[in-house]
Image (spheres, rainbow, N blue to C red):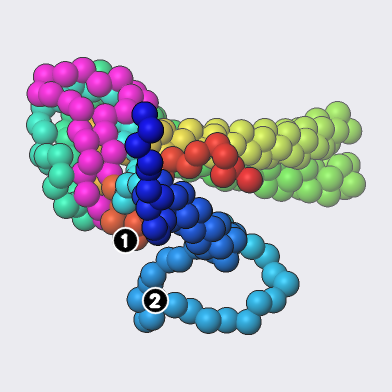
Amino acid sequence: MDTPIEKRKGLRPKTMLLILSGAGIVALSIWLIATAGTSVFRVQAERITIATVIQDEFKDYISVIGTVAPISTILLDVEEGGKVIQKVAEEGQMLKKGDTLVRLENNELSLQILNSEGQLAYQSNELRNTLINMERQKISNKQQLLSIDYQLKLLERTWERNKNLFALHHISQEEYLISKDNYELAVAERALRYEQMLQDSIFRENQRLQMGISLNNMEQNLQIVRQRLDKLNIQAPVDGQLGSLNIEIGQLINRGERIGQIHVLDDYKISAEIDEHYID
């Protein structure tokens, strides 16, 4: 207990540790103060663009995933229904405008065309018979008019002769008046007959015109029905690629039913979904 302890010279290890720790804290504080609010990002020089700062609209760009699609798609809707008898084109095939895709069959439409053709033939015969009858009636009217004019001349000559004979007192007044009345009656009947022929001619001409109009309408209807028959061959409306064709042989297709689509490949567009945050 009474042994004297000699005081060591120099700094103790604990003191050295405290000094080093304090120095480290001071150095860290100085570095944090010096680099506060700054960061370092290394980039290649060729990727740096330098421009003057101006007051302008800020454009925000985002990256999204899109799908390249044809500029337009033509839907194929059937204009005339029927039964599929032949499938000419296949999906993915390149088409030209007017190429046949599908052939349909419609027996009801074919029967309708036959009926229309029969009615047209009947109406044509009726019009032809009417024209023949009109010509016959016209000739008959001329013959009757010639006969009337002949009889009128005979009556006029009889009346002129009787007038002279009556002036010479060779015939009675009654005989003279009868010849005069017969002539005047013939003149009136001739005028009436001519008016009747004129009215009959007008009526027949109107009948001919009406039948001609009816015949023309029937021809137009037949042409329309035949065009419907042509539509049983479904054709490509534009140049493009057949995207889909949802039919099978023997399938019944209704009028207006959609059977496929054609992609127009003249140009393209990109379809992409944008997050609602960027709607504005």
Q: Nearer the viewer, residue 115 or 32?
A: 32
Left or right, residue 143 beside residue 75: right
Frontmost residue, 255 versus 222: 255
Compared to 23, does 187 lie above or below?
above
Left or right: 65 as drawn, with respect to 178: left
Asked whether the residues under the numbered discs 1 and 2 touch, taking CB atoms below 8 Å apart as contact, a structural biologist would say no
Residue 61 sits above or below residue 158 on the image: below
Q: Position of residue 25 (x, y in %)?
A: 50, 53
In this rendering, the answer to whether 33 lies above or below 197 is below
Residue at which label 2 appears: 47
Magenta region: which residues?
Answer: 239-262
Image point (44%, 77%), residue name = 48
**Front tag of 1 and 2:** 2
Q: Residues within 10 Å of mark 1 (few under 14, many from 20)?
A: few
- Residue 181 x/y as whole percent: 82, 32
Where disc 1 sits, the SS reads strand
Q: Which image quarter holds the N terminus?
A: top left
**Residue 26 horizontal/vertical position (percent):** 54, 58
| Left or right side of 227 for 211 | right
Mark 1 residue type: Asp
Res. 208 visible in picture: no
Which image quadrant is residue 215 in? top left
Residue indicated by mark 1: 266
Q: Residue at x 39, y 58 (%)?
A: 9
For image coordinates 46% across by 36% down, the residue present is: 217
- Where residue 206 is drawn, which disc sits there? none
